[in-house]
Amino acid sequence: MTAQTDTQGSVTTVYKVSGMSCGHCEGSVSGEISGLPGVTSVKAVASTGEVTVVSAAPLADEAVRAAVDEAGFELVGQA
């Protein structure tokens, strides 16, 4: 469970999400997480179940879990 900070000060975190199976799933998860404060980029990949999030600061796990739940999927944890 690690997050990486790059040279511009943004944080990249990879989460594991279960239940995604298609592009629509990826869009649902990305859309919900994109709405969290400080998020600048989200890339969801259904085939791996990984969601890469770039944010201005580390995100609270509870906030990410709530966003993934709202999209109809389950946050397994950080990759």
Image (tube, helix red, strand yellow):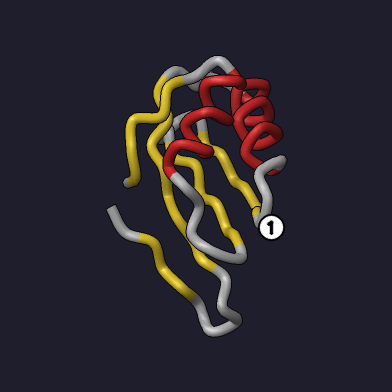
Residue toward you, 76 or 47: 76
Does dot 1 land on a helix, a strand or a loop? strand
Side (left or right) of 20 relative to 29 = left
Q: Residues within 10 Å of mark 1 (few under 14, many from 20)?
A: some
Residue placed under numbered mark 1 in the picture: 40
Residue 54 in the image: above or below residue 43? below
Against 74, residue 16 (above or below) is: below
Height in image: 13 above or below 45?
below
Q: Position of residue 37 (x, y in %)?
A: 68, 50
Relative to the observer, which residue lies in front, 64 or 44?
Answer: 64
- The residue at 50%/77% (across/down) is 6
- The vertical placement of 43 against 65, above or below, is below
Question: Residue pushed farthest bottom?
Answer: 7
State which quadrant residue 38 falls in.
Answer: bottom right
Q: Residue farthest to the left?
A: 1
Residue 23 is left or right of residue 4, and the answer is right
Residue located at (33% from left, 38% from top): 77
Residue 13 position by quadrant: bottom left
The residue that appears at 44% across and 18% down in the rendered structure is: 19
Relative to 1, 50 lies left or right: right
Q: Residue 48: x and y, percent?
A: 41, 35
Tell which of 52 and 23 is nearer to you: 52
Residue 8 x/y as whole percent: 60, 81
**39 with respect to 53 (left or right):** right
20 or 41, nearer to the observer = 41
The residue that appears at 45% across and 36% down in the rendered structure is 62
Q: Of the residues shown, which amino acid type is indicated by label 1?
A: Thr
Q: How many marks are shown on the rendered structure?
A: 1
Q: Residue 61's spot in the image, x, y percent?
A: 42, 42
